[in-house]
Image: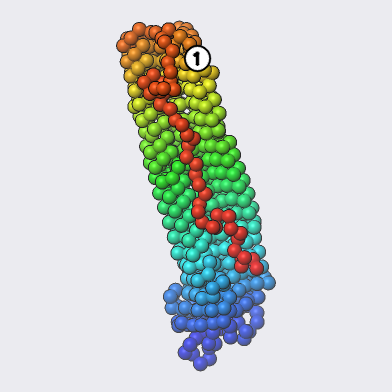
Amino acid sequence: MRALVVSQTSRRAFRNLVDALNAATGPLRIVVEPGHYRMPACRVWGQVRIEARDALGSVTIDCGGEPNVRVENGGSVVLHRLTLRNFHEQAPTVEVVGGELTVEECVLSSISGTAVSAGGAQLFLRRSHVTGGGVACSDAVGVIESCTVADTTANAMDFYRGSRFTLADVTVRQAGAFGVWVTSGSDARIERCRVEEAATAGVVIDGRATAALLGTQVRAPGEAGVIVRNRAVVVMEDTTVSDAGNVGVWTTGGGQLTARRVLVERAQGPSGFHVTEKGTATLENGCVAASKECGIVAEDGATVAVAHTDVLQPGGDAIALHRSEATLRDTRVRGGAYGVLLEAESALTATRLSVAEPRVMGVSVAGSSSARLAECALSGATEGPGLATLQASTCSFTGGSIGGSGLQGALTANAGSSLTLADARLTGNGASGAACADGAELTLLDCVITENGGPGVGGTVDSTVTVERTTSRDNAAEDALHLPKLNLDESPEPDGAPARATAPARATAPAADAADAAPPSHAGS
């Protein structure tokens, strides 16, 4: 490899990179002595290594053309310890098309939306700082590691048209739109990264792309923390999403998400974990904490599976289902308005669900929904029943306990509603242990109902109550199965469940134009 020198002082050296590149053919090693250089845009076809003689910061190279360095036609270029700045309104700082570019220990900045562009090429970016413009990769492959991409005017990192990249130990800070966007069939492995204060969304995966977020932190995005949409498939593990301005993690448009050991905390919008529009999400060994509104929301044909997960102290409902399906296993809910709310023909299967201290109700099954609860514990509902089946809904509750509710332990009301409790214990509730009203059906099998503030079992004359092998004792009043009809529409609170008139709040799309924008035209050009 032939060695050349670029210097502002040495008489035998070249004065700029373009002169050195034009002076020789074959593999080149160009050493740049300390100084502040200006250069026209240059194109490289061969094998070249360009490096500062001294440490990073000793060499600054400015360019007003487009771009500083363009690698093409199979060229292979290594840039080392250089500061490259581009001042063209539409140009990246470095670009590789059909070749290979390695950038190590460099600072790259631009005033356009893109500082680093790769199209149909290989890109390796290590221990470098990118600012002003972001990184845009089209039909490219490579690795980006130990880098910082900060203060970009638009998206910080774009991967599209089948790109394949690994991001490791990368910090993305204050992106003008998305922090990381993986789209149009691309694949990204995002490991041990930090995405902070993106203007809209932290990480977006869509357009049938695939991605893995591993050991990554997404903090304080203006809108959503992580979005999985448009049939993208994503795995998240050991990842934290905190302080999102809207939704913490949002799966929509047929997206598929598997999240393990994921913490979503302090989301400021409709929910911490939101699944909608036929999205599918699995949350295992996770935690959704301190959401301003709901903890977990599933709606519009979504399917959710939650296991070994805590939903803690949401401002609104802990888990809300609206025209969706959910499976809960070994899930713990603490606080919130409703512990679990089903509406609009939703379906729930829950095993070993624990709901403690909701303000309104433990579990509400309403709007022609259905639920199967096994070995569940519902306790401490402050204002309403522990469990309610309403509005032509059905529910079975087997082998669990309901206690400490402000009103009934279990309530079923409205024609077409039915509730079956088997091998259940209802104790210490403020009103009756179990109640049936307004044309509903209640079945009690092998239950124990004790120490409640009203009758153990109560039913109105227009309801149907079946009791078999059930113990009802030490309650404040005798069982009463022929009470007068109740008008629950006029006064739902005293004898019925607090009503909820509306569906869960819907998440709104990030407001940035980048949400549906086409990829930048310069990448791969």
Res. 259 in view = yes
Quarter of the rendering occupied by the C terminus: bottom right
Q: Is residue 250 left or right of residue 495?
A: right
Image position, residue 100 (x, y; %): 62, 68
In this view, the residue in front, 285 or 315, is 315
In this view, the residue in front, 502 or 366, is 502
Determine whether the residue tagged by mark 1 lies in a helix, strand or loop.
Answer: loop
Residue type pointed to by label 1: Gly
Q: Please identify the residue farthest to the right as the structure is shown.
A: 73
Q: Is residue 251 left or right of residue 310?
A: right
Q: Relative to residue 252, is residue 37 depicted above or below?
A: below
Quarter of the rendering occupied by the N terminus: bottom right
What residue sits 54% from the left and 67% below the top?
114
Q: Relative to residue 437, is residue 339 depicted above or below?
A: below
Res. 5 in view = no
Q: Which residue is mark 1?
A: 439
